[in-house]
Amino acid sequence: MTLSLPPDTTVRTTGPRLPADPERWPDVARLPRASALRTAVARRLVESALNRLPLRIRHGDGPRSLPAPGTPRDGVPTLTLHDPAAFHRRIGADGLIGFGESYMAGEWDSDDLVGLLTVLATHVDELVPAPLRRLRGLWAHRRPSGDRGTVEGARDNIHRHYDLSNELFALFLDPSLMYSSAVFDTLPATPDALTAAQHAKIDRLLDLADVGPGTRLLEIGTGWGELAVRAAARGADVLTITLSEEQRDLALRRIAAAGASGRVTVELRDYREVEGRYDAVVSVEMIEAVGAEFWPAYFTALRRLLAPGGRVALQAITMPHDRMLATARTHTWISKYVFPGGLIPSPDAISRESAAAGLDITYDEGFGDHYAETLRLWRERFLGDPDAVDALGFDATFRRMWELYLAYSEAGFRARYLDVRQLRLVAAGPDGEDAP
């Protein structure tokens, strides 16, 4: 027999948790149901795992260090548990979702959040003993069926992230408003290099797609219009599509301000609804929002929309195939709070799905270190003006959520858990090309 606590019971060892709006953040404001046994097992597993890593644990009621043997204390990130009981209870109930919600609730902190998360990402395969990984289904949640990337579901998923507020994104993005990895001349990057690096990224993609005067270009995923403007400056005729009304409206204003309205058309449209044939198709970090179930439809659309001799240029975040398969089966903190319905593909998945659709990959290059630097600059800008975030109506829980999202993503690239790649695809067979 196990003892369960009601979901709204607060268990504290030190200090108050950050108040969270129970209507907006119900699973942060209240602690989850978890048996005493499950919480105790989670605590033992977590402490055992963390004790083997190069980091320190400090409890809010006083220092308690658990450094890895032989690890120098200087430069080692610290995990400070303000509320150890709540921290372990959330993990016992909800795994890594609970880990993220515990941070949102202010139950733990770190003096080096990215460093801490990088350690965890680097040693992700060591955190849970191998025999227990087979029991993942006991604590991992299934993805909600409503998050599937159907035509209607995709619109809702995009709305929940990209329609948060144009002003919010403008707070941490550079003036190009590119929400994807830049390509820098040198690393580490400086803040004043970000816009030029975003333009360098765009130019590389347009070059891969051979965009020039008279090119009929389709962009899948408008963002805020910077790529379309830059393509129009080359003399291309651009159709760019988005599912975000907020992005569409601002993109139209930015395109008009750049004098590119005569060459750029912006439409609220799903990639499956586009008709016609295009000399070039460009899509920047959009495949991650499609969902594995719909990757065949995505690559089939790319092939269907490509004119003879045309090229597709993609920029895609990737992860190793085995980790992609594990992530695909579970509801994660990122899919719950940041990117509903999405899944980062593996290079193997992209290769398989593109080949099945009749597309050959003729160029493929990764540059994950550049994404880590891009995310660092975004995070520093976001954290640099909390009052501006508050003024937009976003509360402290949101700020901690967004900080964790940016730090978590940066750590993934620094640990090589994630990568970002630019690819060129052409039609297989007589409609394609033998590009070097």
Image (cartoon, rainbow, N blue to C red):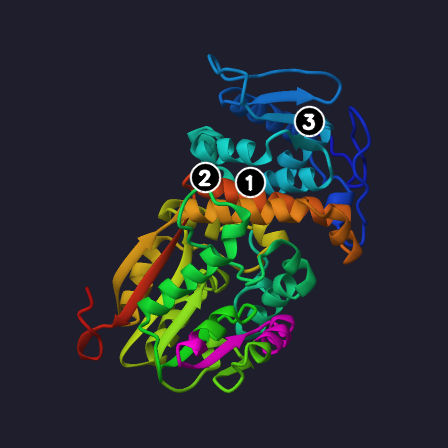
Magenta residues (range): 231-254
Q: Name the residue under label 3.
A: 81
Q: Which amino acid is tagged 2? A: Arg
Is mark 3 in CB contact (under 8 Å) with mark 2? Answer: no
User: What amino acid is at disc 3?
Assistant: Leu
Q: Distance between the residues labelled 1 and 2?
A: 30 Å
The residue that mark 1 highlights is 138
Crowding near pointer 1: few (<14 within 10 Å), some, many (20+)?
few
Figure check: 370 above or below 160: above
Disc 2: which residue: 414
Label 2 element class: helix
Q: Can residue 176 be seen in this view?
A: yes
Q: Quick check: 63 above or below 183? A: above
User: Dot 1: what SS?
Assistant: helix
Image quadrant where residue 39 sits = top right
Whether residue 339 is situated above or below residue 111 in the rendered picture: below
Residue under the image location 54 percent in, 60 percent down: 341
Measuring from the top left, give residue 431's x and y in whole percent: 22, 79
Camera-side residue of 113 and 193: 193
**Mark 3, secondary structure of its residue:** strand
User: Residue 364, position in %: x, y?
Assistant: 29, 57
Relative image position of residue 337 (x, y in whole percent): 63, 52
The disc, 1 or 2, on the residue closer to the chain's N-terminal end is 1
Q: Along the polypeptide, which appears first: circle 1 or circle 3?
A: 3
- Against 117, residue 151 (above or below) is below
Q: Is residue 165 visible?
A: no
Residue 236 lies within the magenta run: yes
Q: Which of 102 and 418 is in front in this view?
A: 418
Calculate the distance from the C-alpha at mark 3 to the C-alpha at mark 2: 24 Å
